[in-house]
Image (spheres, rainbow, N blue to C red):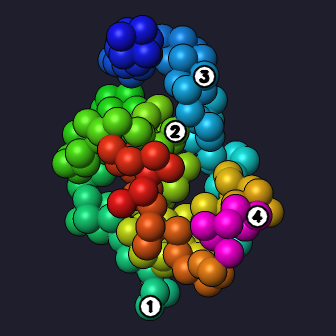
């Protein structure tokens, strides 16, 4: 009984943090429950993504795939016309068009905080799913490969993509297992 009450309170706090709090309060609440939550205003553009820019395919190269609205020059689908400002907070923008079922027991930290750009490039990429880097090594920008590799369950998974077993967005299973 007591444990279910604690889970209920935690779920209520997370819901309130995601829906109605300031970015700072949302960050503080989400980072208490989840690892890897980007700080307010820092969705990796200057840090995590900045280190990976050299690994990205250049726009116009054969492997580069553009995000649909960007390719169609529908900038006002995301930006205020005539400027670079977004039409809504970045935490809500992607889910405005993308139907992502995150009503699960466990939510990946960047997803919970609306940090889609930590993992995805909103304009385009040379990687699958508009990822900012290679899927095989991508998760290790935030998750320690030594610590992950030391776990018995991962001993035989060398060379396996994390998403073969883990859902990168949300899951009802521990460790976001599929």
Return the x and y of residue 60 as percentages of the image width and height: 46, 82
Which is nearer the eye, 127 or 71? Answer: 127
Mark number, residue 62: 1
Quickly name the residue at label 2.
109
In the image, farthest residue toward the right: 146
Dot 3 falls on a residue whose secondary structure is helix
Q: Position of residue 52 (x, y in %)?
A: 68, 65
Mark toward the viewer: 3 or 4: 4
Name which of mark 3 and mark 4 comes first in the sequence: 3
Q: Are marks 2 and 3 in contact (CB under 8 Å)?
A: no
Q: Earlier in the sequence, mark 2 or mark 3?
A: 3
Image-quadrant location for residue 53: bottom right
Picture layout, residue 85 above or below residue 138:
above
Can you say whether 26 is above or below 127 in the image?
above
State the CA–CA distance, disc 2 to disc 3: 10 Å
Label 3: how many Cα within 10 Å (few below 14, some 14–19, many 20+) = few
- The residue sitting at 55% across, 49% down in the picture is 118
Which residue bears the numbered disc 4?
150
What residue is disc 3 on? 32
Q: Nearer the viewer, residue 128 or 60?
A: 128
Dot placed on the residue nearer the N-terminal end, 4 or 1: 1
Which callout, 1 or 2, points at the residue further toward the start of the chain?
A: 1
Point out the stretch of residues depicted in magenta.
Answer: 149-155
Q: Which mark is residue 74?
A: none
Q: CA distance from mark 1 to mark 3?
A: 42 Å
């Amino acid at each position: 009984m007591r444990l279910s009450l604690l889970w209920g309170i935690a779920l209520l706090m997370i819901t309130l943090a995601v829906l109605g709090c300031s970015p700072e309060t949302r960050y503080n609440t989400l980072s208490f429950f989840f690892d890897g939550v980007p700080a307010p205003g820092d969705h990796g553009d200057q840090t995590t993504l900045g280190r990976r820019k050299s690994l990205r395919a250049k726009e116009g190269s054969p492997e580069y795939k553009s995000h649909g609205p960007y390719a169609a020059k529908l900038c006002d689908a995301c930006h205020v016309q005539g400027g670079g400002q977004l039409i809504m907070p970045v935490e809500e923008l992607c889910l405005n068009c993308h139907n992502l079922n995150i009503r699960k027991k466990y939510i990946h930290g960047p997803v919970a905080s609306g940090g889609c750009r930590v993992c995805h490039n909103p304009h385009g990429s040379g990687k699958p799913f508009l990822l900012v880097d290679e899927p095989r090594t991508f998760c290790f920008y935030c998750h320690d490969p030594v610590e992950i590799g030391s776990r018995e369950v991962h001993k035989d998974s060398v060379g396996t993509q994390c998403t073969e077993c883990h859902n990168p967005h949300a899951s009802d299973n521990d460790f976001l297992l599929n």
